[in-house]
Amino acid sequence: MPYIKTTAFIDWNSQLLQSGLSIKKNPIGAAEIAFKNITRKIIRTLDEINSEMPFKVNLRFYHGWHKGYEETVNSKAIRSVVAKTDFSTLSTKRNIVFDAEVGYGSCLLSALPSRLHDKQGIHLPNTLRDKIEGRGLEEKMVDTALATDILVTAYAEPTTWIIAAFEDDDLIPSLFSAEAAIHRSGSRILLIGLRKRSKNFLKLDNICV
């Protein structure tokens, strides 16, 4: 049986916060723990759904990867972790494998090549910015890039399973719309997160896992 194509869209900021380490003091350590935790969650989730179905998972990370045109510390950290990962041994389950080709939200899945920055080769520089009041940093265009790529995948590749790892309710509408595009093919939308959401407001049965 051929592998079922599965794409995991990961809000990296939420994963780093769950690592328990200071991002400023130990960015590589935080990235290592976050990467290990999210891949384990993906493996556990898919294996619990069906321990026999073969899945091939492509990872895509979304974060403020550039301050202006400069690559951030967190970008360098995750790229270092990815570079030293042996993807052939990453999964502990025989029915689940990971694609060694990892994607980052600074390059959209569906945007014209003419929109790529000439020197950076990305669609979205400057996704990490100083706050207007001058206190700290904030991400820009990250959530919309994640939501856009989820929808593009659902409509362009309806047989692909979609895993979303985030905590922000602002991204829920993209899952509902993506589900409408893929449900006839038998594919699934799966939301991995720690947040407990009230069933009184959002009907997330068969999505939240």
Image (tube, rainbow, N blue to C red):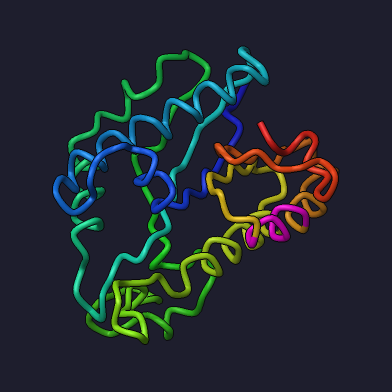
The residue positioned 31% from the left and 65% from the top of the image is 65
Is residue 205 found left or right of 34 in the rendered image? right
- Residue 75 falls within the magenta-colored stretch: no
In the figure, 55 relative to 31: above or below? above
Rendering quarter of residue 164: top right
The residue positioned 40% from the left and 44% from the top of the image is 15
In the figure, 141 relative to 22: above or below? below
In the figure, 62 relative to 58: above or below? below
Instruction: In this rendered view, identify the residue nearer to me: 50 or 131.
Output: 131
Rendering quarter of residue 195: top right
Residue 32 % position (x, y): 25, 36
Residue 29 % position (x, y): 19, 38
Residue 203 % position (x, y): 83, 44
The residue positioned 34% from the left and 24% from the top of the image is 90
- Residue 172 falls within the magenta-colored stretch: yes
The residue positioned 63% from the left and 17% from the top of the image is 48
- What segment is highlighted magenta in the picture? 170-176
- Quadrant in which the C terminus is drawn: top right
Residue 143 % position (x, y): 53, 65
Rendering quarter of residue 185: top right
Main SS type for the magenta part?
helix
Q: How many marks?
A: 0
- Quadrant in which the N terminus is drawn: top right
In the figure, 171 relative to 141: above or below? above
Instruction: In this rendered view, identify the residue nearer to me: 21 or 65.
Output: 21
